[in-house]
Every structure is written in C-alpha cells, then in structure tokens.
Image (cartoon, grey):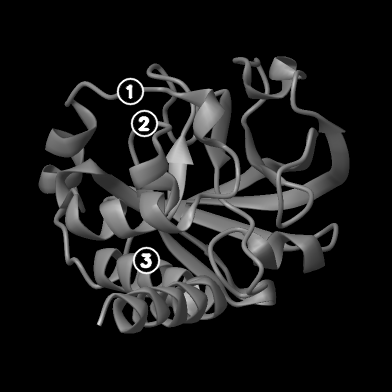
Amino acid sequence: MYKKVIIAVLVLSGLLLIFSPFIKESIISWLSNSQNKTELTAAEAQKNNEEKALFEFDAIQPPSFFETLKAGFDREPKAVIGRISISSVDMKLPILKGTTNQNLLSGAATMRPDQKMGEGNYPLAGHHMRQKNLLFGPLLKIKKGARIVITDFKKDYIYTVTSKKVISEMDAGVIQETKEKEITLITCDKAERTEGRLAVKGKLIDVAVHVK
C-alpha cells in the first residue's frame, strides 16, 4: 500500500511538472481576458486611480506556477484604471495601478505613483511569457511607427512608436518623468529570468474623446 501511494505521488508530481506551463498560461489568459471584459466608467477608473498602490520592481520576472495560481485567487478588479491597445500586434490589455506580480499577471502595470496619461512619461510594465501572444509578448514584433492607444475611458491617448531596444534591468532612467509627452513599455527580453529588458518608446500624437 505504501509503495502504491509513493508511485501515485510521483506520477502526479510528474504530470504537474509536465502540464504546469500550460496551466499557468491558461490562468494568465483567463486573468487578462476577465479584466478586459470589466466595463468601467471613466468615474470608476478615476476612483481606482486614487487608491494607493505598491510598486515592487522585483516582480518584473517570469512568474512561477504557484505565483500564477495565487494570482488567480487574488484577482483585484479595483486596480484597473484603463486599457492599452496596439492593433498592429493584436494586443489589448487592462492597465492596472501598481507594479505587483498580481497586476503583471493580469495586464499592463503602472510604474510610478505620479504618472498621468497624456502627461510626461507614462511607463507600463508587463510580463513576457513563453506563449508569445500573452501579456507583453507581442511587443517583440512591434515596429517603429506602430500606434499605441491608452484610455482612461474618458479620453484616448494615441502614441506612435519611436524606438525599441534592449536595456539593462538596472536602467531606471527610462521610467523617470520627462518634459516630452511619451509612453514607455517595459518587459523582459526573454521568457525566462534575465537581466535584459525590452523598452519600447512612443510619442504622443493625438488625444480623442473615448468611444465605447
């Protein structure tokens, strides 16, 4: 009987090891899609943006299976303050206030407590997963001139990509405030633990009234 239990545990452990990447990515896809389906008014998004948030830059690394599983239970819709869309790479994600693993597993996370859409530098971080169409994975395919649209559900802020490069994870200068009206998108340069970060920059070219 004891041997059968040991064998069963080993078999289950082996199956978990094999299928955990697929389970993890399924959870992430569900988290992102469920947050995207949340219909917020501009007033609700503004209220969420007034809440306090954590900024944990160590969280910008590929998450473990158990971190992903925990995020599935700890989903926080009140963190959603907007949405980012990049049609050229088929990317649409919720924008969440605060750089936490939970937020990074759901969409694009803000990186400074003082950042404002359409003003100065608006940095966002996102995970780069093995499945290239999840979260910020599509940024690897983005090209100069591509349009990035972010919205607070009141206005749409339209940017055009001006640069794309790999930087060091220690290069915090890219998220600092600037006089120029721009956006900075940050993700790991590989779908594994790495010291490199892909940084995509864009400049503001237009502001329009948001239409659902």
On the question of residue 10 being in view, the answer is: yes
* Residue that mark 1 sits on: 54
Q: Quadrant of residue 138?
A: bottom right
Q: Name the quadrant of the N terminus.
A: bottom left
Could you say whether the residue bearing mark 2 is in a helix, strand or loop?
loop
The residue located at (80%, 68%) in the rendering is 141
Q: On the picture, is 165 further left or further right than 100?
A: right
Local packing at callout 2 (Cα closer than 10 Å; few below 14, some 14-19, many 20+) is many
Q: Nearer the viewer, residue 184 or 12?
A: 12
Q: On the picture, is 165 further left or further right than 153?
A: right
Dot label at residue 176: none
Q: Nearer the viewer, residue 48 or 102?
A: 102
Q: On the picture, is 158 further left or further right than 137?
A: left
Could you say whether the residue bearing mark 3 is in a helix, strand or loop?
helix
Q: Position of residue 53 (x, y in %)?
A: 27, 24
The first of marks 1 and 3 along the sequence is: 3
* Residue that mark 2 sits on: 98
Instruction: Tell me the amino acid under the disc marked 3.
Output: Ser
The residue located at (84%, 63%) in the rendering is 143
The first of marks 3 and 2 along the sequence is: 3
The residue located at (44%, 72%) in the rendering is 13
Dot label at residue 32: 3
The correct choice, above or below, for 42 with respect to 147 in the image is above
On the question of residue 106 being in view, the answer is: no
Could you say whether the residue bearing mark 1 is in a helix, strand or loop?
loop
